[in-house]
Image (cartoon, rainbow, N blue to C red):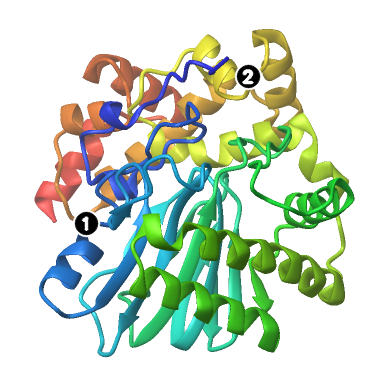
Amino acid sequence: MKRKSKMTVEDITPVHPADRPTVFREPGSMLYADNCKDLQAAAQRGEVELKAWTRGSYPGLSLQHRLPQICTVGYWDAKTEQDWRLARHCNEGIKLAYVARGSLHVDVDGVSHRLVQGQLLVVRPWQLHSIGEPNVGPSRLIWTILDVGVRRPNEQWTWPEWVLLSDHEKECLKKLVQLNEKPVWDAGSELSKIYESIAHIVRDRLPEQGETRLKIALNSLFSCLLERMEVQAPALNHNLSFMQNTVLIFLKQLEHALDQHWTLDAMAEECGLSRTRFADYCKKLKNMTPMEYLTHLRLEHGIALLASEQKLTVTEVAFQCGFNSSQYFSSAFRRRFGHPPSEMTRKQCEG
């Protein structure tokens, strides 16, 4: 049964969607349908080669019923510096992206990394990440995104039937991906060859002609990935699969959705918890009730907006921060900082 989410793509309208990540989503929904539009536009202009088999709103040839749980598989080949990037977002599956040539700057959960030729990016569905700093440079990136039915780190994986790994191998690979947060890996020569074979299949064949070949290649990829990750032996942290970590991730990402209509029930539902358990975790992690922490984040964002060069009115700031009225914002602001927000706007105007 699908969990009804309180946050949807349609809810996020005030600013560019790729800069406003939701936290957890209903399985099957597409996050930031336009996050790839800049890449797609560059491909249409001939500035980058883009080939992919996809479903949903990802650009490329439709997989339709083929390879269930693959969101997208393909590559881009950018020969020159680009004027676009993949802004901060989450994916609905495990992203496995290989840098075949060139280099890329990526940001995963606020930490910057530089990927060079021969390295692999592994990103979990709950990890916010962007590619390009500030834009994508000359690079060839080959990727696949596999939806294993999880949106939170504590959930159970569901592998597609066409994956031929043994149950033991599936469990080992799941643990290696789920119980560490290392995003950058050395691919090795065998995995590199597999990725290039995937790119050739997607480039040279239609989905109905190359489905079997791609299944074989992807199974080889997962088997080789397991070996590579075992060789590089990350330290596994079983705490990452605990419900407390799910709440911590939600609280970290809450600042990106402050203008949503959050209630205690909505926040608890996003984490799959009862009101009481969610509130207990929040107090343990932040020493505040959920609504106190939400107000804290909104006021911190409010004072940053008032101090910015945008010269927004108090009412504009209030609504951008998620307050229902400028009066409520002003009252909470005065209690927190000892003076009304209008005092800051007056100083901005005088400056």
Considering only order in the chain, which callout, 1 or 2, is on the residue closer to the N terminus? Answer: 1
Q: Which residue is rendered at x = 37% and y = 25% of the image?
A: 334
Helix, strand or loop under label 2: loop
Q: Please determine whether, in this image, residue 213 is positioned above or below residue 197.
A: above
Q: Please determine whether, in this image, residue 185 is positioned above or below residue 17.
A: below
Image location (x, y in percent) of residue 116: 53, 87
Image location (x, y in percent) of residue 90: 47, 48
| Left-right relation of 245 to 260 | right
Instruction: Name the amino acid, label 2.
Output: Thr
Q: Which residue is rendered at x = 44% and y = 80% of the image?
A: 104
Q: Which residue is rendered at x = 68% and y = 68% of the image?
A: 220
Q: Nearer the viewer, residue 187 or 62?
A: 62
Q: Are marks 2 and 1 in contact (CB under 8 Å)?
A: no
Answer whether residue 318 is visible to the viewer in this image. no
Answer whether residue 52 is visible to the viewer in this image. yes
In the picture, residue 50 is in which quadrant? bottom left
In the picture, residue 302 is in which quadrant? top left
| Left-right relation of 60 to 71 | left
Disc number lying in front (2 or 1)? 1
| Left-right relation of 254 to 306 | right
Q: How many marks?
A: 2
What's the mark number on residue 289?
2
| Left-right relation of 288 to 349 | right
Q: Nearer the viewer, residue 50 or 4?
A: 50
Q: Which residue is mark 1?
A: 37
Image location (x, y in percent) of residue 200: 43, 78
Q: Residues within 10 Å of mark 2 (few under 14, many from 20)?
A: some
Q: Which residue is rendered at x = 40% and y = 42% of the image?
A: 21
Q: CA distance from mark 2 to mark 1?
A: 39 Å
